[in-house]
């Protein structure tokens, strides 16, 4: 099946990676459904039309996720691809001081949401006789490399890696492929702003902070959302790759 024939759901569409990805996919697939928490006009110039639908909602709720999927099936009759970019590290503390309410929020939005999205995807994609479907989750290098004060995030993303492997195993009988992209620090608009604030607060230059971020990478360059698109395109179209997580860590 060509990309141009696919019904595609992108979650986290209002995010630093999600927004440019939404703009990349828009017009290149049969129907694109984006979901984020913000209103569409607040983060992009793309307008809704017969090939693009936007659903603003919280995705930490089982009922919302069920509603989102049943709406898509009612409206478009099938779903071929789910790209999940919902997630984030949210809070930073050493484990000794990590409030459990914050731990729960991090695990919920990274792992439980990924689990619920996978569950609903399998439920509907298995109806796509023959063609199956493709599920792609965004993981993080924080699952393998220590990210200072971000233990719950690393733990949650390690869980998403396990989810990818288990769901690929179980979904193979329906010809559904499940894969992941695991980037190191991606320089999104939000991250650029955070670096500027950090520079002001710590009396360091933006360049110094950026160099520190890139320490340990073989390729001393910044990773931008657009750098990930060729891999996204591959993994939402592949009919032969499943259960794999691709490190995009510039050689780290
Ligand atoms: N950027 C990086 O350096 C990096 C590195 C490795 C992995 N990742 C992973 O890549 C993915 C995308 O990262 P990003 O930088 O684009 O993050 P981001 O800018 O924080 O965007 C996250 C997206 O998830 C949405 N979201 C958060 N909580 C939600 C909830 N409860 N219900 C529904 N939507 C919710 C956000 O909505 P709002 O716009 O309303 O907040 C936003 O659309 C994440 O899974 C992240 O962990 C990112």
Image (spheres, helix red, strand yellow):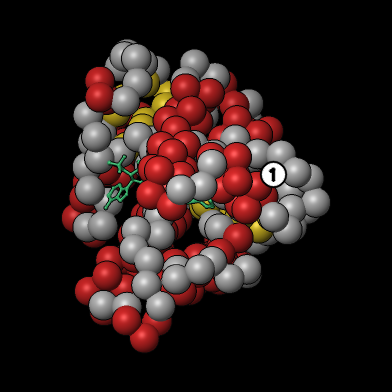
Disc 1 CB within 8 Å of nearest ligand 1 atom: no
- Is residue 31 among the parts visible in the rendering? yes
Residue holding disc 1: 239
Nearest the eye: 3 or 185 = 185
Q: Considering only vertical position in the picture, is 156 above or below 43?
A: below
At horizontal 44% and vertical 39% (from top left) the residue drawn is 196
Q: Considering only vertical position in the picture, is 128 above or below 98?
A: above
User: x and y percent of residue 88 in the render?
Assistant: 40, 55
User: x and y percent of residue 155 in the render?
Assistant: 48, 74
Nearest the eye: 57 or 150 = 150
User: x and y percent of residue 158 in the render?
Assistant: 54, 70
At horizontal 25% and vertical 40% (from top left) the residue drawn is 37
Query: Quadrant location of the N terminus?
Result: top right
Query: Quadrant location of the C terminus?
Result: bottom right
Quadrant in the picture for residue 70: top left
Q: Residues within 10 Å of mark 1 (few under 14, many from 20)?
A: some
At horizontal 25% and vertical 20% (from top left) the residue drawn is 41
Nearest the eye: 50 or 55 = 55
User: x and y percent of residue 17 in the render?
Assistant: 48, 38
- Is residue 16 among the parts visible in the rendering? no
Q: Secondary structure at mark 1?
A: loop
Residue lying furthest front: 203
Nearest the eye: 44 or 146 = 146
Quadrant in the picture for residue 173: bottom right
At horizontal 63% and vertical 26% (from top left) the residue drawn is 2
């Amino acid at each position: 099946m060509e990309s141009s024939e696919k019904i595609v759901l992108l979650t986290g569409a209002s995010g630093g990676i999600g927004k440019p990805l939404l703009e990349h996919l828009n017009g290149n697939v049969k129907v694109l459904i984006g979901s984020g928490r913000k209103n569409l006009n607040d983060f992009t110039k793309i307008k809704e039309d017969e090939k693009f639908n936007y659903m603003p909602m919280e995705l930490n709720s089982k009922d919302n996720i069920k509603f989102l999927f049943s709406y898509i099936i009612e409206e478009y009759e099938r779903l071929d691809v789910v790209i999940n970019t919902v997630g984030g590290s949210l809070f930073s503390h050493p484990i000794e001081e990590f409030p459990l309410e914050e731990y729960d929020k991090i695990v919920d939005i990274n792992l439980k949401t990924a689990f619920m999205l996978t569950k609903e995807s399998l439920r509907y994609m298995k109806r796509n006789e023959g063609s199956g479907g493709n599920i792609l989750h965004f993981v993080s290098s924080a699952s393998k490399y220590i990210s200072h004060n971000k233990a719950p995030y690393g733990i949650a993303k390690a869980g998403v890696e396990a989810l990818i492997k288990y769901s690929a195993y179980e979904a193979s009988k329906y010809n559904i492929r499940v894969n992941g992209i695991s980037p190191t620090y991606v320089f999104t608009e939000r991250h650029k702003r955070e670096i500027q604030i950090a520079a002001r607060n710590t009396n360091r230059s933006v360049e110094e902070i950026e160099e520190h971020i890139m320490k340990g990478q073989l390729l001393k360059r910044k990773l931008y959302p657009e750098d990930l698109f060729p891999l996204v395109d591959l993994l939402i179209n592949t009919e032969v790759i499943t259960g794999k997580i691709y490190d995009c860590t510039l050689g780290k």
